[in-house]
Amino acid sequence: MITKPPDLNGLSVLIADHDLPSLQRMKKDLEGFGADVFSFEKIDAALAALSKKHIHVVMVSLECADERFIETVRSYKKDFPDTFVYLLTEKTYDSVETSSEEVRLIVDDYIQKPLDALRFARMIETNIGRPSTGSTSLAVIEPLVAKVKPYFIFRSASMRRALARLPEIAASGQTVLISGETGTGKELVARAIHVLSALSSGPFVPINCGAIPESLIEGELFGHEKGAFTGAVKTRRGKFESAHNGTLFLDEIGDMPINLQVRLLRVLEDGMVYRVGAERPVQVKVRVIAATAVDLEKQVKDRLFRQDLYYRLNILRIHLPPLRERVDDIPLLALHFLERAFSEMGRTPPYPTLSSETIYLLEKLPWKGNVRELRNIMTRIATLLPPGTKRIFPIHILPLIEENEKTYRISEKESKGVFMPSGSTLAQAEEMIISRALEQTNGNRTQA
């Protein structure tokens, strides 16, 4: 699908930046999208212009954000609350730590340099309420989303494909195998299948096959008779009997001991359970849903999982994509988990919101722990957010992310290099290169 370029016609943008090449580049790029751009190297001239014009978007470098800027913008936004104010930072958000809390209270977001003009223009379109040129609204997605919305939050194409047959699978009553990385929501899918099935009035009984010692899992699954072994002082029903007329969810099925896989296969085939130490079977009516984070086909080849059991479990299959492959869902999930955490803490709306750059940062993180990790970080943010914060910026999130998770998916445009607008003179190009060299050497002229 070809998306239309952003349209900033009719919008006025004021930019103040000491870095002349950067200032010229931003002015030219935004004018290319139809904006009326007023650029200034000095903050005095920018503030003077702000007092004479109605500006829709104000962009000021962090170095220019002095006390006069704070007071002027605070007063200006009282008269024009629809104006968006952005601070321009260097390539990382580390410098944002030096900005005062007063600054954070008046700005709408922090934007990294060099400016990605296309992304910024689209962000402006979204913020001012113009129709989106490329995104899909959750409200207009096919009926599948509406049907499973009580259980899942998504709008990505990968999740729509994964769950496309969920209603039919739930209604079938057949055994289901759910695969996917840890933290992708396999148990949530299993519960949705149960609720949407004819057995929804019966119990949903989960058991993690990898969390129970091998010596105990047989009794947990199948139960035992009184006196079957030392310590068996009374008869105990297993998970299969507890799930009668309902659903048994076998999580991490790949961790089930090979000797128990034969017994599980027999139960699946004839619906009869033998308790440990029992002479007569107990008949059960149970739908089994299994889940795995490992490659069961490989385990079959390695003789760690029985092939016949694999085929018996793999009648209907759902594979859940990792969060990094469903980036469109990250903003929805992040907001959902954040609001849920605030609600659980007893806070009343309106809740602090995520800035556009914060959402962009979240979309770039690797999310090795998938949805579970995102939920945990949102809970962490809600718990540790400074009092009075109204908007959550990247600087609020970065300290709460584990160091080994801060490996961003950086686009080619954001890779290291000197970006020069077409038509730059030799003197301008030289100034850009020298400026970047000084930046990389922390101002050491000899090294630069």
Image (spheres, rainbow, N blue to C red):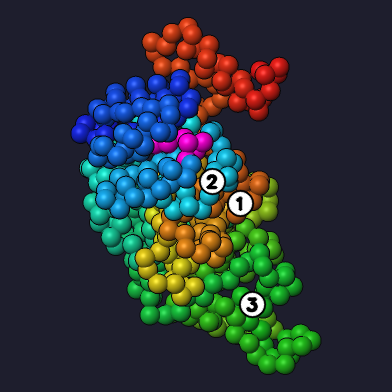
Across and down, in percent, residue 108 comes to 39, 47
Q: Which corner quadrant holds the N terminus? A: top left
The answer to which quarter of the image holds residue 120 is: top left
Residue 405 in sight in this render: yes
Secondary structure, mark 2, is loop
Across and down, in percent, residue 128 comes to 27, 45
Most extreme residue toward the right, as rendered?
Answer: 230
Disc 3: which residue: 220
Q: How far apart are marks 1 and 3 (CA)?
A: 42 Å
The answer to which quarter of the image holds residue 380 is: bottom right
Q: Which corner quadrant holds the C terminus? A: top right
Task: Name the residue rendered at 40%, 33% in the picture.
Answer: 44
Task: Name the residue rendered at 20%, 34% in the picture.
Answer: 10
Task: Name the residue rendered at 67%, 74% in the picture.
Answer: 218
Local crowd size for mark 2, using a 10 Å CA cut-off: few (<14), some (14–19), many (≥20): some
Across and down, in percent, residue 384 comes to 56, 63
Viewer-side label of 2, 1? 2
In the image, residue 201 above or below residue 156: below
Local crowd size for mark 3, using a 10 Å CA cut-off: few (<14), some (14–19), many (≥20): some
Tag of residue 399: 1
Task: Name the residue rendered at 59%, 85% in the picture.
Answer: 237
Q: In this view, does 302 lie to the left or right of 87?
A: right
Out of 194 and 430, give the one closest to the viewer: 430
* Residue 1 drawn in magenta: no
In the image, residue 374 above or below residue 328: below
N-terminal of the pair, mark 1 or mark 3, is: 3
Disc 2: which residue: 99
Across and down, in percent, residue 443 comes to 65, 25
Local crowd size for mark 1, using a 10 Å CA cut-off: few (<14), some (14–19), many (≥20): few
The residues colored magenta run 59-65
How many numbered discs sit on the rendered protein? 3
Secondary structure, mark 1, is helix
